[in-house]
Amino acid sequence: MFVSYKWLQDYVDLSGINATELADKITKSGIEVEGVEKKSEGLKGVVIGHVLEREQHPNADKLNKCLVDIGSENPVQIVCGAPNVDKGQKVAVATVGAVLPGNFKIKKAKLRGEESHGMICSLQELGFESKLVSKDYATGIFVFPNDAEVGKDALEELGLSDEVLELGLTPNRSDALSMLGVAYEVGAILGREVKWPVIENEEAAEKASDYISVKVEAKAKADNPLYIAKIIKDVKVGPSPLWMQTRLMSAGIRPHNNVVDITNYILLEYGQPLHAFDYDRFGSKEIVIRRAKDAEKVVTLDETERTLTPEHLVITNGNEPVAIAGVMGGANSEVKNDTTNIIIESAYFAGTVVRKASKDHGLRSEASARFEKGVDPARVREAGERAAQLIAQYAGGTILQGTAEVDELTMEPAVISITLEKINTLLGTGMTVSEVESIFKRLQFGVELDNETFTITVPTRRGDITIEVDLVEEAARLYGYDNIPATLPIGSATPGQLTDYQIKRRKARRTLEGAGLYQAVTYSLTSQEKAAQFALETRESIRLAMPMSEERSQLRLSIVPQLLEVVKYNNARQLDSLALYEIGSVFFKQDGQELPEEKEHIAGAITGLWESHLWQGEKKPVDFYVAKGVIEALFDTLGLADQINYRQAEINDMHPGRTAEVLLNSEVIGFIGQVHPTVQKDLDIKETYIFELSLKALAEAEVAPIAYETIPRYPSTTRDIALVVDKATKAGDIQSIIIEAGGKLLKEVGIFDLYEGERMEQGKKSIAYSLKYFDPERTLTDEDITKAHDNVLAAVKEKAGAELRG
């Protein structure tokens, strides 16, 4: 909301306080003033001139030589290139020595051989935005009304000696979307009276109801409980007064003509949007407000055909739409230069229906912004009367008696009781009864006092105040936040600490980052195709009711697809080596439940080189064992290493020979492996290894307490064996057999070699294991070791068909 400091003075006395000081007070009271613009900053030396003569420049087709009276002793010659400059006009003249925006200094010049003592200015050259300049002067100089005084300061006449405050309003403060609303706020802050416009309309004997009737269809009653139409005859459409045009431009609205400008002026003054229809183009003597028919069309004022639905409210002439209610009027009843009779609409439209139409048609207007947030129902009728008054005054119209209307609007101001004790307790203040009473009266609320209990009647303009704490907030901001004492909290304090789950999640994050992985944060929303890809659980995904796009229409069941998008993005920008992880939620549909089940997973994607030492000429590409080493470090940190096993698996979109399920105490909690080559090709990424694990399962697993053992006094013995087995036999299965058969003396088993060379029998492979035997109570004899070792060899032969390699 842009607020003119000079315009504001029409409603509240601002003597003794400048615009900057006022902005500071408004901000401290709860409404942020984002800036104060001094319209004339950097401008000087611009006066009103009178063009006495104009003739074609002798040496240039597009230049004119003008003799201009600027109020000095002698007229001056000015060369001007504007196409609309002419004899007899009153214009803005930047005299020699003047300064225009951008520190542009006007000097005496010679243009094509003719002297020029100044510059005749357009509004754009004086600092007005092009979009705010009336179409009549958009491509040329501005022309003042004939009664403008020659030699007078043009900046004053154009409203450029003003200052404009930009208010950053929150959605609940729609009351401040008008000059009168801001005046109430300023009056309360300064403790000064608010002056309302005096409305005294002279009406003709003819009745408005004889010219027009109003009907709201039953289905639209809740959308439009109040609609008022006034008839004004014999108007003369033309430019609005200069002071009104400049006020509109200061507020960010382009002037059009006196009738349209007055409706916009009332919108800014009262916060009540109005609309003017050309009565003779309206097409009937009946206004019917209803929901639109499906696929019904209307051409709006921007010359765009809009297709309507039954969710949109329209104003019709009984047959066809003439406006989208609260959003924009129709071109078929637009006020034009030849308009003589008009209908003024002032209505109360429900914010939800206006918001729906505004969003569907991409029409965000000053009117729709106010209806969406809620207008004051008490001002609807008065705003229409005020508009009629100004039209009669500045467009020469005759106001017909009364109105045509439908009024089923119930206006009940909120009545709230609150005690002084509660206000002071919540704020920690010591305000007295008289101080609190003064605050509410300055806000122009109704106040009744019973001992120390206030019964407050809240005006309808303050729809944001509905409960006790709203009154407490009003008392606090006008008492002054700076005056509220700073106190320490009272009560017992308990030390905060992380939960066991939070501790383990933090350990997981730090372990992965310590291993060299970077944290990624990706969208929880994905497409239908990717929602279930790589999912740990086969369950139905959840679709959003109103997705932004099909690419973001589903809640994800896996984090991996989003990480692969990150890999793709970076690979496309020549970043080939990446190591990423993400801790985030996946979502599952619950039968009979509105909200999804949310589970936290931990996932990673690694591609490119894991190590690269150019000086030594060493490069280590990422492979399955690099990724496995990363998650094993994670399991070790969480104390779960001895509870984890791996099992070869076939998972959709994963490499069939390089993929494994991760088991925690025989329960599958995730997977690890390479992305299938075809998927890599489709995504245009390099060889990539991924993992995804249930963080919940890892965090909730029972961890054996750490037990320390003494350094062994007795030596251990190591035996190596190379076993020939079928190629299909899994090394992990053999290792499990060895551990089971080795008994209590076998302490460690590890694989150190795999051979599948040409000397090996067809369909066979050799796997070499290192076995460590140890007893903490004594030194093992050869007989003890041989017995245990023979048990191992017999077991692997019996259960896996393994033979010792010769």
Image (cartoon, rainbow, N blue to C red):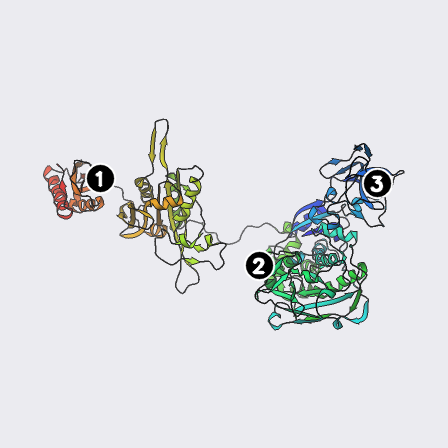
Residue bearing mark 1: 751
Q: Position of residue 119 (x, y in %)?
A: 79, 39
Q: Is residue 9 left or right of residue 792?
A: right
Q: Which mark is residue 360?
A: 2
The answer to whether residue 284 is above or below residue 60 is below
Q: Nearer the viewer, mark 2 or mark 1?
A: 2
Residue bearing mark 3: 55
**The image quarter in which residue 309 lies:** bottom right
The answer to whether residue 626 is above or below residue 199 is above
Q: Nearer the viewer, mark 3 or mark 1?
A: 3
The Cα–Cα distance between marks 3 and 1, rounded to whole angstroms, is 103 Å
Question: Callout 2 environment at 10 Å: few (<14), some (14 to 19), or many (20+)?
Answer: some
Q: Position of residue 779 (x, y in %)?
A: 14, 37
Residue 335 in view, yes or no: yes
Q: Position of residue 572 (x, y in %)?
A: 44, 40
Residue at the left extreme of this rendering: 783
Q: Earlier in the sequence, mark 3 or mark 2?
A: 3
The answer to whether residue 740 is above or below residue 185 is above
